[in-house]
């Protein structure tokens, strides 16, 4: 009898151990794997992680692990121990685009614990100042008059900028050739220089719009972007396309529910701070104040995958 009681007590203690550990979490710094090189995106992510560090009482240390369309860093995060001490910066490219189109991908979105989206922003459809394209209708007319003659510039691989333009082509029936670039800055440089006619820019390119170096045609949000009040949305023009690059956080699958809750709560609290919202808005970004939850992030990814498969023609971009 005593032996049985001893085993029962031991089992109960072992079962409670993870709960106790989760309650004490975090007790050391948290590594944040960043699957792209250092740059301007890092600075924006740090606005959020620095506030999360204050909330959690431990530093969030960002470690850049770029390469292979964000696969290298994301795979490292996915394969790490699910104890909450290794999480990753998550984008469309890393969570679902690369796993769908890269044949060497070894993970999918289902291998991650989604922690929530921190911020988002629309893209801006742009034309170069040397072109005669001054509106979306001009673009559609020119593309239909000479199928395949116009070019669009976008980062190579599974960038949301390329994916969105391919969706635009499907929804409008135009034939515009893709010219790949090793980064958005290089793509925009050639649009400004007249080597390529059109593409999508990010909201950080606002100074280029204001100076006339890029000609904004439309935004990819449902409504107009406040910083460009005279530029219509694609929806407004009758094109049912909404696409907004976002940045969030994810962890390996199998994270303890209590640890997941601590992380998602810290993220939600951080993005709702007025100073964080102001800092993000100064960079043309909108913090996810309404719903930065893990469930909302999963639903968002599922919806984006469905739109991608519906509006990107098979064979245009390789599917896994």
Image (cartoon, grey):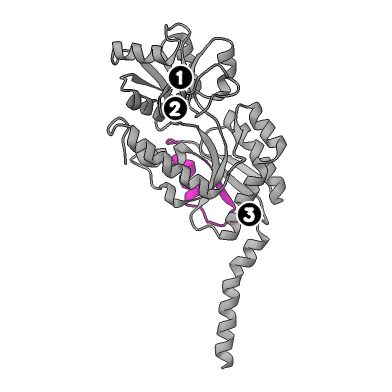
Q: Residue at x 51, y 50 (%)?
A: 295
* 143 or 13: nearer the viewer: 143
**How many numbered discs, if any?**
3
Name the mark nearer the viewer: 1 or 2: 2
Q: Is residue 212 left or right of residue 131?
A: right
Where residue 113 appears, as percent x and y from the top left, is 50, 52
Q: Which comes before the other along the chain, label 1 or label 3?
A: 1
Q: Residue 49: which numbered mark, if any? A: none
- Which image quarter holds the C terminus? top left
CA neighbours of label 2 inside 10 A, class few (<14), some (14 to 19), many (20+): many
Q: Is residue 162 left or right of residue 262?
A: left
* 251 or 268: nearer the viewer: 268
Q: Which residue is mark 1?
A: 187
Q: Identify the secondary structure beneath mark 1.
A: helix
Q: Residue at x 56, y 90 (%)?
A: 3
- Which image quarter holds the N terminus? bottom right
Distance from disc 2 to disc 3, alpha carbons, whole Å, reads: 33 Å
CA neighbours of label 1 inside 10 A, class few (<14), some (14 to 19), many (20+): many
The reply to whether residue 31 is visible in this rendering is: yes
What segment is highlighted magenta in the picture? 68-90
Residue 309 is drawn in which quadrant? top left
Where residue 260 appears, as percent x and y from the top left, is 58, 55
Q: Which comes before the other along the chain, label 1 or label 2?
A: 2
Q: Residue at x 70, y 40 (%)?
A: 273
Q: Which residue is mark 3?
A: 262
Where residue 91 appears, as percent x and y from the top left, is 50, 38
Name the mark nearer the viewer: 1 or 3: 3
Kindly check if marks 1 and 2 are in contact, taking CB atoms under 8 A apart as contact: yes
Distance from disc 1 to disc 3, alpha carbons, whole Å, reads: 40 Å
Q: Residue 161: which numbered mark, if any? A: 2
226 drawn magenta: no
């Amino acid at each position: 009898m005593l032996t049985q009681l001893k085993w029962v007590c031991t089992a109960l203690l072992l079962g409670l151990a993870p709960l106790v550990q989760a309650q004490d979490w975090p007790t050391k710094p948290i590594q944040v794997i960043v699957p792209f090189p250092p740059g301007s995106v890092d600075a924006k992510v740090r606005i959020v992680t620095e506030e999360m560090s204050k909330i959690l009482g431990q530093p969030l240390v960002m470690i850049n692990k770029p390469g292979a369309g964000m696969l290298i860093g994301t795979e490292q995060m996915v394969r790490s121990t699910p104890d909450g001490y290794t999480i990753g910066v998550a984008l469309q490219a890393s969570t679902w685009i690369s796993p769908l189109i890269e044949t060497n991908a070894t993970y999918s979105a289902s291998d991650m614990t989604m922690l929530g989206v921190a911020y988002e922003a629309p893209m801006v459809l742009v034309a170069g100042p040397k072109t005669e394209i001054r509106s979306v209708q001009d673009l559609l007319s020119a593309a239909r008059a000479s199928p395949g003659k116009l070019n669009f510039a976008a980062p190579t691989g599974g960038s949301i900028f390329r994916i969105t333009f391919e969706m635009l082509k499907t929804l409008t029936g135009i034939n515009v050739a893709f010219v790949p670039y090793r980064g958005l800055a290089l793509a925009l440089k050639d649009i400004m220089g007249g080597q390529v006619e059109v593409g999508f820019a990010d909201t950080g390119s606002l100074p280029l719009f204001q100076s006339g170096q890029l000609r904004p045609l439309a935004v990819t949000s449902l409504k107009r972007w406040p910083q460009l009040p005279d530029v219509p949305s694609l929806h407004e023009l009758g094109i049912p396309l909404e696409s907004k690059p976002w940045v969030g956080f994810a962890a390996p699958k199998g994270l303890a529910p209590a640890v997941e809750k601590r992380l998602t709560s810290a993220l939600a609290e951080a993005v709702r701070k007025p100073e964080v919202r102001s800092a993000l808005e100064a960079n043309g970004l909108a913090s996810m104040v309404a719903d930065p939850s893990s469930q909302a992030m999963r639903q968002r990814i599922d919806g984006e995958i469905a739109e991608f498969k519906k509006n990107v023609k098979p064979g245009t971009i390789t599917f896994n």
